[in-house]
Structures are given as C-alpha cells and as structure tokens.
Image: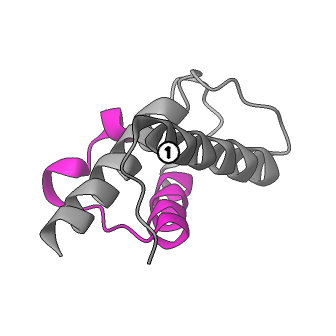
Amino acid sequence: MTTVDNQAGAATGAEDVQRRLVAFLSSRTGGDWAVDQDLFASGAFSSLFSLELLQHVEQEFQVTVEGDDLTLDNFRTVPAITALVVRLRGEGAAGQ
C-alpha cells in the first residue's frame, strides 16, 4: 500500500476525485457541468438521481456515507462532494 504524506499528493487526490465526479455527471446527464454549479438548484436531478449519486460516490471512492454526512450540503456541488470523499478517506485511514 502506498501512502502520500505531503499536501501536493493530497491535492492531486482531490483533483482526481473532482475530475471523476465531473466525468460521472457529464456521462449521466449528457451535459457539461461547472465545478461549482449547484447540482440541485439546476433542476437537472431528481431524488432518484440523488440516490444514484450517493451510490456512485460510495462505490467509486470506496467510502461509506452515513449519519450526519447524509446532508444535501455535502452533495450540492462537486467541491462539496470532493471534500466529503477526501475527509472520509482520511478518517478511514486514520482509524485503521
């Protein structure tokens, strides 16, 4: 297992998460998404898509989103989802 202990590596990981999220959104909607666009205010997503997004995030990034993390604010924008994934990955690594 390889670990990254510097901030540059963390930034690269966050950039990868963000890139993969934008690719997923584009593939599912057939459109381009601005990174900071409010996904729910756009009206493009249904409650069913919200569940699909949650499932994608958990499977794609090997995290479990539960409890207090299941909030709209954590899924409102790509940076918010990215921050959630990075935080959950960090907590998981620290707890192992």
> Image quarter for residue 88?
bottom left
Mark 1 crowdedness (10 Å alpha carbons): few <14, some 14-19, many ≥20: few
Question: Measuring 55% from the left and 67% from the top, which residue is drawn there?
Answer: 60
Q: Which residues are magenta?
A: 48-74
Q: Is residue 38 visible?
A: yes
Along the line of sight, the residue nearer the viewer: 44 or 79:
79
Q: Amino acid at mark 1?
A: Gly
| Depth check, front residue: 13 or 3 | 3
Q: Residue at x 85, y 45 (%)?
A: 30
Magenta segment, prevailing SS (helix, strand or loop): helix
Q: Quadrant of the C terminus?
A: bottom left
Q: Secondary structure at mark 1?
A: helix
Q: Which residue is mark 1?
A: 9
Residue 84 location in percent, x, y?
Answer: 34, 45
Q: Is residue 79 left or right of residue 35?
A: left
Measured along the vertical axis of the image, is residue 71 above or below residue 60?
A: above
